[in-house]
Amino acid sequence: MNTTAVGTPTRIRVAERSFAKATTVPWLSWAGLVASAAIASGVYWDISWHETIGRDSFWTPAHLLIQFGAIVAGLASSWVIFKTTFGGDAAGRQSSVSVLGFRGPLGAFILAWGGAAMLTSAPFDNWWHDAYGLDVKIVSPPHMLLALGIFGINWGAVFLTVAKLNRSQGVERKRLEYLLLAIGGFIIVQMMTLKLEFAGRTWLHSAFPYVVISLGVLFVLEALARVTGHRWARTMITGIYTGFCLLMLWILPLFPAQPKLGPVYQKITHMVPLPFPILLVVAALLWIWPGRHSETRHAGNRRFWAA
């Protein structure tokens, strides 16, 4: 009787500590968010660099910032995978997946693959330029490999965060929801950057750019909004995209720069920013028009995804 009385509270306390540990915001998700932000900044800066200065060298600050994000994601996910595989956390191994004999969270493997793809694209892109000269397009084989790696990092962070979100509640769940929405914002940034080639001013008087823009973007917005159940999810995600593009639009022209490669048809004295962002946030605001979303509908969404 005494042994049971003492042992039961002890087991309860151990279970409570284990649950609290499981519901903390995963640091690997934060690493994925930092990597996504660094990559988005580097890609935007790199396009501006090409438009202003030209591709003068592979070792530009913009390229290094992009690869920094890949290294952060790759090292952080590799640490988690090796720790899960060779560490003493038996519970962690049981709740993980196995890939080529290694064990770890599914999101960690996706992160690691994304970082590896990005690092592989760097010498591929350098060889491409040496072999075929300067390109004037975003869509090229090395850039597509880079884009796949970027989306691997983005979605790896999403998988990690959602896995914790499904086992969390209260304050921790709210933190994870905001973390997930922040990652979603940078996913939209990357998607819209990839679509820049088909969404220029000369295209916007036709239906084609709007079809291109809608591909994938609506899925990301709706999926993350339903997973979090947040009323303002779509507005927050598109707001991050709009705010990020506006900051880059205002900050980059503050730095002096001159073209190093011709032909130059007009004098450029400062960094050239990318176009004004597409107003996705307006559509997101219209989506939450009063009466469009009610607490009953959100409760139904949450029950659907929990089933």
Image (tube, rainbow, N blue to C red):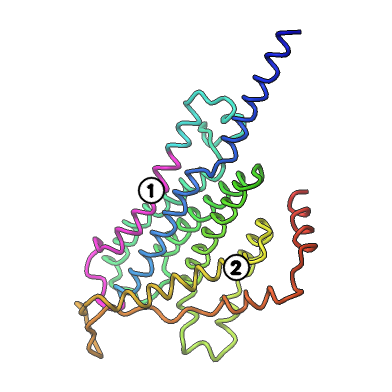
Q: Are marks 2 and 1 in contact (CB under 8 Å)?
A: no
Side (left or right) of 93 relative to 70? right
Amino acid type for the residue under numbered disc 1? Val
Residue sitting at x 38%, y 77%: 249
Residue 77 in the magenta stretch? The answer is: yes
Q: Considering depth in this image, is 163 or 250 the residue closer to the camera? A: 250
The majority secondary structure of the magenta stretch comes to helix
Q: Which quarter shows the N terminus?
A: top right
Instruction: Determine the residue positioned at 43% across, 39% down.
Output: 78
What residue range appears in magenta?
51-78
Left-right relation of 299 to 264: right
Let me know if residue 88 appears in the view. yes
Q: Nearer the viewer, mark 2 or mark 1?
A: 1
- Per the image, the residue denoted by label 1 is 72
Expressed as whole percent of the image width and height from the top left, the position of residue 10 reads: 64, 19
Residue labelled with disc 2: 216
